[in-house]
Amino acid sequence: MTQMSKNASISGDEFTQYTYSKLIANYYLDPIGMAIPIDTNELKGQRMPTLAKALPEMGSDVATIKDPDRVMHVYGSSFDTFTTILGHWLGVDDYMGFRHWWNAIFGFLAIFYTALIVKQLTKGSWLYAWAALLVMLFMPRFFGEAMNNPKDVPFALGYVMSLYYALKLFKGGRNFAWNNVIGLVFGTALGISVRIGGLLSVAIFIMYAGLKYIESLGLKQFLSFKWKGITNLVLWLGSLGLASYILGIFVWPYGWSEPFTNPMEALKEFTNYSVSLRQLFEGKLFDSDMLPLYYLRKYLIITTPLAVLLGLGLFTLLLYPNRKQFNNEIFLILFAAIFPVVYIYIQKSQVYGGIRQILFTLPCFVGIAFVGYQWLDLFLSKMNSKLKGATLVIVLVLTALPAKFIFANHPVSYSYFNEIQGGTSKAYGEYEMDYYLASLRPSTEWFLKNVVEKNPNKKFEVLSYGMDHVKYYCRNYKNVHVGYSRFDDRSAKKWDYCIFYNAYFDKSRLNSGEFPPKGTVYQQMVDGVPAGVVIERPISSTDGSLDDFEGIKAIEKDTAFAKGIELLDRYLKTDPNRSEVHFYVSTAYANLGQIDKAIVAAETARKYYPEHSRSCFALHQYYVSQKNYDKAIQVMSEFIDSRPRDGEGYVMKAQAELMKGDAMSGLATLQAGVAVNPMDYRVYGLGAQAYQMQKDVTNYNLWVQAAQIGTAKSQIDFQMGVEAIMTIYESITGEPLDTKKYGLSN
């Protein structure tokens, strides 16, 4: 694992985590004169402007305040801080590689402790422990992130350590061994120091200790309240929990600065954390806060190796016949596996990126699976003694499948889907694959080896959506300049090569020819499907000019619309699937007054990228200008269906409905818009217009009052507008407006 970590890719949030860890590190290093250099531009580059603004005045104490922009203050970041300080002291140049080496160590230890837990669950069987180590090692979703996930993997280690030492500490009665005490406190503290959700480990080991206490006491005596030694046990458990808590938040400046309030606020923020990321699920792009409730459950089923799923099935099937073997130890691990998943489901907490947020439960599922295998082995051996151990043959055979996938697809092996789904190739276009940007590394390394190193005196302009990642991989090549671009904005910029990964595409785009696009010279394949690409800019004319770039420039900057159309049409003969280029053609035609041609071009753009917002909005305007309100409404209805969190769609659809004279439909659309974006004053202006059409004076006045937040000339007017919005919002949604969320609370 440490060797393979040398090829591990930088994951999605690593630069943000590394930058923030330097703030935490300086909280401890600055007083001893060993602070790590960091400036405001570095913080701004990671989209933490609030901390950047506070840094000059607060210095190292900036780590104790909230980060409202990226919410990094809710993470303890102990792993990041540890590797940052150590790397700084050692003068490490490849600091990302250094982090990945340590990440691999933490990942392996999580696998190792999983095997030790299986030994405890299977009555001391080293054979099952070794088999569990192999199964856990070759679990692609865990292994693939074990080397580059500095949040979930260290947290998983803390979780599984806490469980193992709880088993050791409380299983044998009240004879507590200090090595187990230290292991329990350290493991629990490690989890807390990564994220405050590690407090779950405290609750779990207290619950287990209580069950073991009842077991030793006897249920009859417990129910008669003859609780001998309960005071000592409560004091002991309280001490263990308090020690774990203090040690966990000690390395977390925000938590340590207000130890009784800030960690609890962070826990609340974690529970209610909301971010809107586009996620591909069952062939459709969803906003991550609108994914189906069964999202997590289905991901567990289609990404967990068959060896584990079969073991879990055996456990369920054989549970009743082996009910007398179901002890507190098995219950502990079963509870630790299931409870976090159930809690997320009940709380409707937001999850995305597959099973990343519950990665820490995988060791527990493996533990329960091996209980199932042991029960089957006991059943078979009773039938025929020669069958003893046969189940382990099944385990090893099934484990060979994901093991082969890992070695064939490193460092993108975390994109694994099991045989129930039909493998990763069948999941392509149905589920998100490279959400952690892993394919950028092998793609960039191919580009450096096959293009840059063969042309050492040539300068290269490279664009990528993962700019920081590609820039880091190219850091030793001075003739490579890396810039930022979204996949669909690349024609508007000058570049020689682009390097992209396949996240945030829907099924139609992945299968329409837009990805991999024209000009692709390298594809990083995973199970036969492309995860990442290197694109060489297609040259569409004989003189070598950049027709797409020059055409867009002519339209946007020079208003030379006819010239722009000519250049872009010439480019489209070479690369016809470009939604972005078709959109610019449509705007040029619209500016020339040729609306019919503009509509054709915009509809073509939508053919390749159905939810392309600029094409949808342009089409809406074109149809409205022709008074074809039904088509304008249809376009916006389709846009809202694909992007229900984009408030612009509701405004534009309602405009067309009101122009059509349909006040009732317009109000229904606007009410949906209020639920999505209650602070958009345009919604209330249109709503007032709709109520005026209906001659509803009361609601007209209320919505006019709400609309004045956009034009208020005094604080009183603004406050009256807010009060009107609060009334409208609650009447529509049935819930009070979260004024704090929109910055309206004092």
Image (spheres, helix red, strand yellow):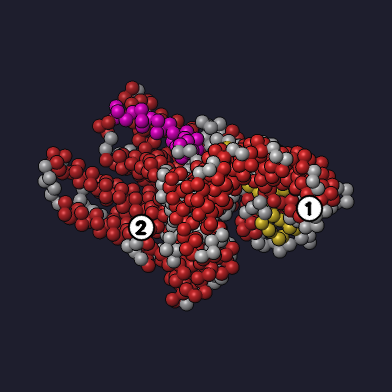
How far is the residue under mark 1 from the one under mark 2?
54 Å
Residue at 71% in and 56% down = 462
Which region shows up in magenta?
Answer: 294-322
Vertical comparison of 634 with 210: above or below: above
Q: Is residue 319 magenta?
A: yes
Image coordinates for residue 365, horizontal then vertical, percent: 40, 39
Location of residue 704 in the rendering, given as x and y in whole percent from the top left corner: 52, 52
* In this rendering, position of residue 251 left or right of residue 223: right
Q: Residue furthest right?
A: 543
Report if residue 670 is visible in the image.
Answer: no
**Residue 137, numbered label:** none
Question: Residue, x 56% and y 50% (percent of image)?
Answer: 685
> Mark 1 or mark 2: which is in front?
1
Q: Which residue is mark 1?
A: 555
Examine the structure image and report whether residue 505 is included in the region drawn in magenta: no
- Badge 2: how crowded within 10 Å, few (<14), some, or many (20+)? some
| Number of numbered discs overlaid on the protein picture | 2
Look at the image and tell me in which quarter the C terminus lies.
Answer: bottom left
Q: Is residue 224 left or right of residue 146?
A: left
Circle 2 residue: 264
Residue at x 33% of width, y 41% of height: 335
Dot placed on the residue nearer the N-terminal end, 1 or 2: 2
Residue 537 location (% of width, % of height): 76, 50
| Element type where label 2 sits in the image | helix
Asked whether the beta carbons under mark 1 and mark 2 sit within 8 Å of each other, the answer is no
> What kind of residue is marked 1?
Ile
Q: Position of residue 195 (x, y in %)?
A: 41, 55
Q: Is residue 8 left or right of residue 181?
A: right
Q: Residue at x 24, y 57 (%)?
A: 238
Q: Nearer the viewer, residue 418 or 583?
A: 583
Dominant secondary structure (helix, strand or loop) of the stretch shown in magenta: helix
